[in-house]
Image (tube, rainbow, N blue to C red):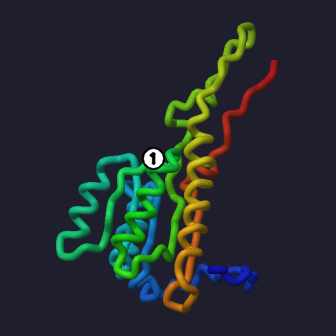
């Protein structure tokens, strides 16, 4: 099933509050949904009437799932490492199989880490010794994992019929850490 070509319609006026009723009945996937911005997305979409499937490596997602499903099944948590293709397939398959319309309408690629994770990419070696190979965990999470999410979103979007009620939306987010610059090194 082909998706109509994107057509730019100008900037979005962010001063206008969005109509959350349009989220009702949608199937939303959120990576990194067990804390921070991701958790807020999970709670807000579920409150607006969407079925939310969220993935995270944190087991806190289990608690959030229990809390939000206390009255009815509104969310599904999948323990998911976005660096792992099969883990993300499980996330998308869960959304497709458990959402009321067996669809994937909105995907929010939210999972990410910062240099505070201890990734050795940012560790400076002694200038008088051989450099050490960096751990590229930041790259694998923030780039490779996000590209996996995008690839799967496009695949699952194309599996459903076109129509007003089954529109598609892909969002890539970044918290403040996405805006923090890399360490600056002075050469003396």
Q: Quadrant of residue 4?
A: bottom right
- Say left or right for 41 vs 137: left
Residue that protrudes farthest toward the right in the picture: 188
Residue at image point 62% right, 54% down: 147
- Say left or right for 43 vs 104: left
Front-lying residue, 6 or 132: 6
User: What is the tally of numbered marks visible in this picture?
Assistant: 1
Q: In this rendering, is residue 187 above or below 111? A: above
Q: In this rendering, is residue 98 above or below 16? A: above
Where does residue 124 sit, x and y in percent of width and height?
66, 21
The 10 Å Cα crowd at callout 1, few under 14, some 14 to 19, many 20 or more, is many
Where does residue 75 sit, x and y in percent of width and height?
32, 68
Q: Quadrant of residue 37?
A: bottom left
Residue at image point 21% right, 62% down: 66
- Say left or right for 2 vs 93: right
Q: Secondary structure at mark 1?
A: loop
Residue that protrudes farthest toward the left in the picture: 71
Residue at image point 62% right, 24% down: 123
Front-lying residue, 4 or 64: 4
Where does residue 67 sit, x and y in percent of width and height?
22, 64
Front-lying residue, 121 or 140: 140
| Quarter the N terminus occupies | bottom right
Residue at image point 52% right, 45% down: 83
| Quarter the C terminus occupies | top right
Q: Quadrant of residue 52?
A: bottom left
Where does residue 85 sit, x and y in percent of width and height?
52, 49
Residue pointed to by mark 1: 81
């Amino acid at each position: 099933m082909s998706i109509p070509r994107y057509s730019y319609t100008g900037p979005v006026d962010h001063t206008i509050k969005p109509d959350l009723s349009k989220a009702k009945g949608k199937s939303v996937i959120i990576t990194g949904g067990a804390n921070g911005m991701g958790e807020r997305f999970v709670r807000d979409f579920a409150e607006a009437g969407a079925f939310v499937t969220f993935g995270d490596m944190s087991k806190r997602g289990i608690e959030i799932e229990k809390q939000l499903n206390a009255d009815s099944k509104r969310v599904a948590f999948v323990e998911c490492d976005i660096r792992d293709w099969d883990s993300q397939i499980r996330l998308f398959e869960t959304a497709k199989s458990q959402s009321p319309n067996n669809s994937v309408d909105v995907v929010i690629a939210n999972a990410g880490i910062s240099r505070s994770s201890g990734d050795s990419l940012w560790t400076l070696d002694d200038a008088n010794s051989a450099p050490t190979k960096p751990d590229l965990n930041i790259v694998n999470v923030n780039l490779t994992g996000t590209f996996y999410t995008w690839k799967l979103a496009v695949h699952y979007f194309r599996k459903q019929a076109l129509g007003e009620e089954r529109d598609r939306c892909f969002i890539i987010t970044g918290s403040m850490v996405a805006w923090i610059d890399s360490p600056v090194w002075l050469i003396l």
